[in-house]
Image (cartoon, helix red, strand yellow):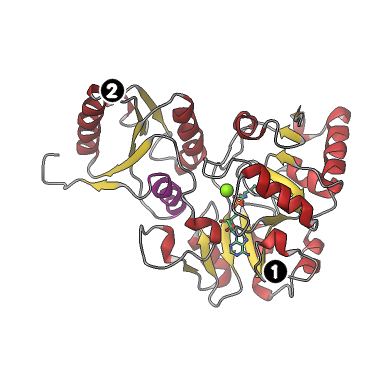
Amino acid sequence: MDTKVITIEALDGAFSPREEQALQSAGAVLRQGGLVAFPTETVYGLGGDALNPASSRKIYAAKGRPSDNPLIVHIARMEDLSPIVKEVTAEARQIAEAFWPGPLTMILPKADKVPYETTGGLETVAVRMPSHPVAQKLILYGGGYVAAPSANLSGRPSPTTAKYVIEDMDGRIDMILDGGEGDIGLESTIADLTVSPPQILRPGYITQDMLTQVLGQVSVDRTILEADSGQAPRAPGMKYRHYAPQGELTIISGPGEQVTAYINTRAAEDRAAGHRVGVIGTDEALAQYRADIVRSLGSRQDEDSIARHLYSILREFDDEKVTRIYSECFEATGLGQAIMNRLLKAAGHKLIVLDGNRKP
Ligand code: TXA
Ligand code: MG
């Protein structure tokens, strides 16, 4: 299949006539059952018509994703929520008002209209209204309901730029809309509203505190930070070893200087053994690392930057054929909960905690 790549810059916040036309034809591709990758404020999505079972099957095939892993339905208008769910509950209204459009997905019992192909056989449906203007326009032109997982091959980090979408999807889908780099860089927060109190199944930019302020009480699926809680995660997708770089990733936690010293020791050993070693650091410690490739997520003071750069660094290490990766560790509160969830999953939960009192 020949994959068309179209750049949508929306300079000065407005689409040019050429861009408007491109978005219309992308919408037509969706309505005819084709697949279009598009930018959102979180990561790039791989879109198909959410109400067309054949489109959802194509999405699974293009990603190489198990079909028991449900898709998120993207909408662009509040009035489009009620036709696809059993009931728009008070809680759904409250969090939609507070966080939509934006990086929040809610789970509700599904209406008959939504095919099981889209929900992976579940009686519930995940719905999100993205804020990215390209996503919004595409959804409207595409018929209002766009099923979109992240636009990566199953098992690879979610793409934060069109370059990575092309890497994974060229030849597998009809069209890719290149809208530059996303703001957030990690997938949306998923809140399950079918349980009481509502539960976070996947942490994201909308934090537990932010949801608690609106809903009162909110719990968190304990599998999101634990290696083996003996419990299956409630978001089916969270059970897979997602976000996995090709190199073996280990996270090092402890006092800053010890972390740097430990990483440098391990990196030297690995390189002597013929490995190509990458380090994921922060601005504060960057100059001290000795490895083949050293990258900064940004300043420790700037969590947004850390979230935004994580996946692109993991991808770059894949491109550079890095075989061992060491990363600094972050506090798992606020946005840090999402950062550590993704980092721990990428590392297959390999975490080394250095004792503050001992030499590594
Ligand atoms: O930010 C995002 O959410 C991106 C952009 C493209 O919008 N999309 C995304 O989709 O991350 P995906 O398919 O990569 O992740 C969807 C997650 C999976 O872990 C899936 O198991 C879970 O949502 N999910 C979807 N529907 C669900 C449901 N009905 N019940 C429980 N979990 C569900
Ligand atoms: Mg994904």
| Residue at left offset 82%, top offset 54% | 144
Q: Is residue 274 left or right of residue 293?
A: left
Q: Is residue 127 left or right of residue 355?
A: right
Q: Quadrant of the N terminus?
A: top right
Q: Against 231, is 253 above or below?
A: above
Q: Neighbour class for label 2 at 10 Å: few (<14), some, many (≥20)?
A: few
Q: Against 208, is 331 above or below?
A: above
Residue 272 in which image quadrant:
top left
337 part of magenta stretch = yes
CA–CA distance in space, label 1 to label 2: 56 Å
Percent of width and height locating residue 72: 66, 56
Q: Which mark is residue 93?
A: 1
Amino acid identity at mark 1: Arg
Q: Which stretch appears magenta?
A: 334-347
Give 282 or 293, whichever is nearer the viewer: 293
The overriding secondary structure of the stretch rendered in magenta is helix
